[in-house]
């Protein structure tokens, strides 16, 4: 099980990329994988091949409308049970609560 953050940037399509993000978000939602949209990218949790297939599908969807696309991927590969997207945040929130 891995947690992955990815972002896809269409090059030469102006300042706002939200239409492309929305298109990719629809693909992510249809995948059924646990995910979280953030201001700077999308987090996915799942098996390696599942995640790479979703990212490729997103990349190619943007590529159909752009001559150049930049995709950035960060992967956290750890032997752990599913649910890490929420657990990682909960862990920090619990530690933060102890500091106040």
Image: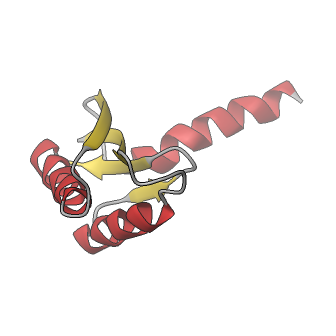
Q: Give the image quarter of residue 90.
A: top right
Q: Position of residue 34 (x, y in %)?
A: 36, 59
Residue at point 13%, 54% (across, down):
53
99 left or right, relative to 27: right
- 58 relative to 45, above or below: below
Q: Position of residue 71 (x, y in %)?
A: 29, 40
12 left or right, relative to 37: left
Q: Nearer the viewer, residue 3 or 55?
A: 55
23 left or right, relative to 96: left
In the rendered image, the residue lying farthest to the right is 100
In the rendered image, the residue lying farthest to the top is 99
97 left or right, relative to 45: right
Q: Give the image quarter of residue 7.
A: top left
Residue at point 24%, 58% (across, down):
58
Q: Nearer the viewer, residue 73 or 43?
A: 73
- 61 relative to 2, above or below: below
**Quadrant assignment for the C terminus:** top right
Q: Position of residue 56 (x, y in %)?
A: 16, 52
Q: Nearer the viewer, residue 56 or 44?
A: 56
* Colouring used for the render: secondary structure
Tally of numbered tags: 0
Q: Nearer the viewer, residue 56 or 91?
A: 56
**Quadrant assignment for the N terminus:** top left
């Amino acid at each position: 099980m891995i947690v992955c953050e990815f972002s896809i940037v269409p090059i030469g399509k102006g300042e706002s990329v939200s239409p492309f993000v929305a298109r990719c978000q629809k693909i992510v939602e249809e995948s059924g994988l646990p995910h979280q949209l953030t201001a700077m990218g999308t987090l996915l949790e799942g098996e390696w091949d599942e995640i790479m297939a979703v990212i490729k599908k997103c990349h190619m969807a943007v590529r159909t409308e752009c001559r150049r696309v930049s995709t950035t991927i960060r992967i956290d590969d750890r032997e752990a049970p599913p649910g890490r997207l929420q657990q990682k945040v909960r862990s920090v929130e619990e530690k933060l609560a102890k500091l106040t």
